[in-house]
Amino acid sequence: MITFRQIRRSLIISSVVGTLLTVTNQYEAVFSAQPINILKAVITYITPFCVTLMASLMERKRMIIDGSAIQAIPPEDLKGAPDDIASIEAPSTHRAHTTD
């Protein structure tokens, strides 16, 4: 299943890579009066999107198959852990002032 996060990441990467490749491949058209080849520009953006999305899907599938997506905490490591996470307090950043 494709997640929103995977699509968003693929869109960001394809926009950056696609722009760099379009400027590189169609330099004359971008910086002069020549027309830009729209089909080439669209393919230049679609290719990194598809590659990124497929890599993400393959990695997710590998993690599920290998079982590395879920890391169980051994019961002995849970001993002494507070029952309520809200009871954990952050260390104080307030320093005591002393007068000499």
Image (tube, grey):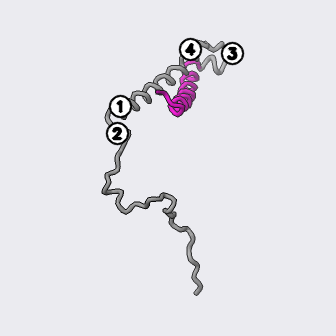
Mark whose residue sits in front, 4 or 3: 4
Q: Which residues are magenta?
A: 1-26
Question: Please, what secondary structure does the residue beneath circle 3 have?
Answer: loop
Measured in 3D between alpha carbons, the distance from the residue under mark 1 to the one under mark 4, in whole angstroms, is: 33 Å
Q: Which residue is mark 1?
A: 62
Q: Quick check: 75 above or below 100? A: above
Q: Quick check: 50 above or below 12? A: above
Q: Which residue is mark 3?
A: 33
Which label's residue is closer to the chain start, 2 or 3? Answer: 3
Q: Is residue 82 magenta?
A: no
Residue positioned 61% across, 13% down in the render: 38
Which kind of residue does numbered mark 2 sit on? Ser
- The residue closer to the viewer here, 11 or 42, is 11
Measured in 3D between alpha carbons, the distance from the residue under mark 1 to the one under mark 3, in whole angstroms, is: 48 Å
Q: Which residue is mark 4?
A: 40
Residue positioned 46% across, 27% down in the render: 1
Which label's residue is closer to the chain start, 4 or 2? Answer: 4
Quadrant in which the C terminus appears: bottom right
Q: How many marks?
A: 4
Q: Residues within 10 Å of mark 1 (few under 14, many from 20)?
A: few
Residue positioned 50% across, 20% down in the render: 47
Which kind of residue does numbered mark 4 sit on? Lys
Disc 1 vs disc 2: Cβ atoms closer than 8 Å?
A: yes
